Amino acid sequence: MINSFKKQFSVPKGILGRVAGTIMAIENKKLNKWTLSQLRIDNSDCILEVGYGSGKCIEYMLKANKLIKIDGLDVSKTMKVSGGTKTG
């Protein structure tokens, strides 16, 4: 069971994948906010988020820069459906 759950952190699937996505969003919050502070995103920027997971980093970007254009890719169909962005 534990190994099955660990696999959810690489390509989340189903209910366990949603749980893993939530855990990753919480654990990555500080790192995502630091990374965004270093990028100095401007409202005229176009961004590609590769492996967006829960979509929280995209949410942070859009909250701070309402006019940017963002596309996202993720291998997990679960994240594409349950992520905050519904892109991909």
Image (tube, rainbow, N blue to C red):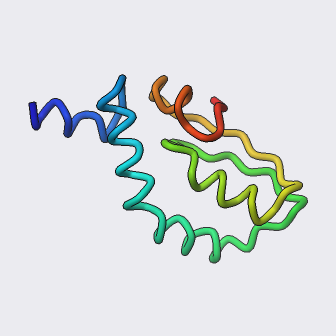
Looking at the picture, how far across and down is residue 86, in whole percent? 64, 31
- Residue at the location (59% across, 55% down)? 57
Q: Quadrant of the N terminus?
A: top left
Position of residue 39 relative to residue 60, above or below, is below
- Residue at the location (74% across, 60% down)? 63
Horizontal placement of 34 versus 7: left or right?
A: right
Q: Quadrant of residue 12?
A: top left
Position of residue 3 relative to residue 60, above or below, is above
Horizontal placement of 75 versus 8: left or right?
A: right
Horizontal placement of 12 versus 29: left or right?
A: left
Q: Quadrant of the C terminus?
A: top right
- Residue at the location (34% across, 39% down)? 19
Looking at the picture, how far across and down is residue 6, in whole percent? 20, 39
Number of on-image labels = 0
Looking at the picture, how far across and down is residue 40, in whole percent? 73, 74
Q: Quadrant of residue 2?
A: top left
- Residue at the location (71% across, 40% down)? 71
* Closer to us: 62 or 45: 62
